Amino acid sequence: MASQERLSSLDALRGLTIIGMIIVNNPGSWTAAYPPLCHSEWMGCTPTDLVFPFFLFIMGFSLFLSTQHRIMRGDSKSTLFWHVLKRSALIFLIGLILNAFPFNNISNLRVLGVLQRIAIVNFACGLFLIYSTRKTRIYSGLIILIIYWVLMCFVPSPLTGYPTLAYETNWAAWLDQNILGRHIWEYMPKMDPEGILSTFPAMVTGLLGIEIAFLFTKQSDQREKTILLLLIGFILTVTGLAWGTVFPLIKKLWTSSYVLYTAGLASMTLGAFYWLIDHYKKEKSVWLLTAFGKNPLVLYVGSELLIMIVWQFHVFGAARLSLNDWFFQFLVDVGASPMNASLAWAILYLSIWAVVAIILFKRKIIVKL
């Protein structure tokens, strides 16, 4: 495969992650969501906990392919650097704007977040691709994961005097409290789930995407490519589970075991998608996933912004509820279970963005930063 070829399976898997993000981020009620559509309270890994690392893995995979294409067309390292810097800075800025909206509490603005983590990981992975060797990338990833494990599990936390993974007192919490201060996510005020320290192992998720993309492009046969994705994915998943016995899977800490486990599942899922979609030429069967995958940031940012606008208007019903609360309560009142009512709103909201995705896809509009 030429490195510039766009994989339909990659677009489809990216689209699936965006669909997942929209559904899990927009329940009708946060107190009535099906467990698989919720993040783990702390340890463990639900299907919802796979969405973000899948996106970062895909981003790393795509970054390798796009960078190779740019190198082949003659782009200099300086040109590549400024492209990565501009894109990362814009994503970070958009994340800050979303965190600030509706701009009534700027003094406590959350500095980090999902888009900010995407931006930082994209920038770090871009620098590794442009300025380092493959060996450096591999060793750097391993060193980050091992140091993170040692720090979190064996070095006494300044907040306790002994090693701990507890939410309020681990090393990540201490760093966020001392550097970010009041600029942490209000719903986890002791430790930001996209905080400073856990961003380093998140970079490794992107680096694994890069490394697997490198190996993928070295295979000439579709069967070999599929086996590669499945085999590496299986090894990473099993290794992550094994490591998880001593360094548990914790999404909010982005533990080293979680990095390997989720990257492994992402690789195996991509392998299955590649075989079914690219090998069997089933692109038309997954066109809706592809539509979401072509404009991921537009759809994610748009969905986050619109729901925050919805939350601002409490004008529905006698109780003066927001639209989503009114819809949820209406379904419960007519006999729906709270969980089904909550899921119904999420699906309805997803449908709105499906229309947007389809319009952009049909008109061949791809918004790139």
Image (tube, grey):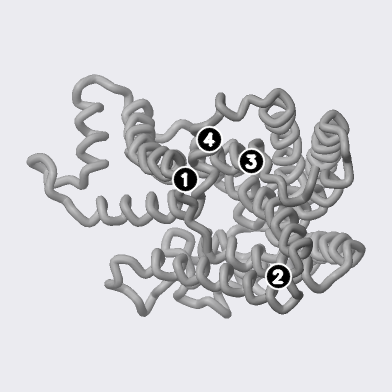
Q: Amino acid at mark 1?
A: Lys
- Name the N-terminal-most of marks 1 and 4: 4
Q: Is residue 164 visible?
A: no
From the image, tell me which residue sits under label 4: 289
- Labels 1 and 4 touching (C-beta < 8 A): no
Dot 4 surroundings within 10 Å: few (below 14), some, or many (20 or more)?
A: many
How far apart in space, not on screen, are marks 1 and 4 (Cα)? Answer: 15 Å
How far apart in space, not on screen, are marks 2 and 4 (Cα)? Answer: 44 Å
Q: Amino acid at mark 2?
A: Ser
For this view, does 108 lie left or right of residue 313?
Answer: right
- Labels 3 and 2 touching (C-beta < 8 A): no
From the image, tell me which residue sits under label 1: 364
Mark closer to the observer (1, 3)? 1
From the image, tell me which residue sits under label 3: 45
Give SS at disc 1. loop
Give SS at disc 4. helix
How far apart in space, not on screen, are marks 3 and 4 (Cα)? Answer: 24 Å
The residue lying furthest to the top in this view is: 335
- Labels 1 and 3 touching (C-beta < 8 A): no
Q: Is residue 125 visible?
A: yes
Q: Give the number of the disc on residue 169.
A: none
Q: Amino acid at mark 3?
A: Cys
Quarter of the figure that contains the N terminus: top right
Mark closer to the observer (1, 4)? 1
For this view, does 247 lie left or right of residue 82?
Answer: right
Q: In the rendered image, which quarter is residue 63 located in?
A: bottom right
Dot 2 surroundings within 10 Å: few (below 14), some, or many (20 or more)?
A: many
Mark closer to the observer (2, 1)? 1
- Name the N-terminal-most of marks 3 and 2: 3
Between 265 and 243, which is closer to the camera in this rendering?
A: 265
Residue under the image location 67 percent in, 28 percent down: 277
From the image, tell me which residue sits under label 2: 157
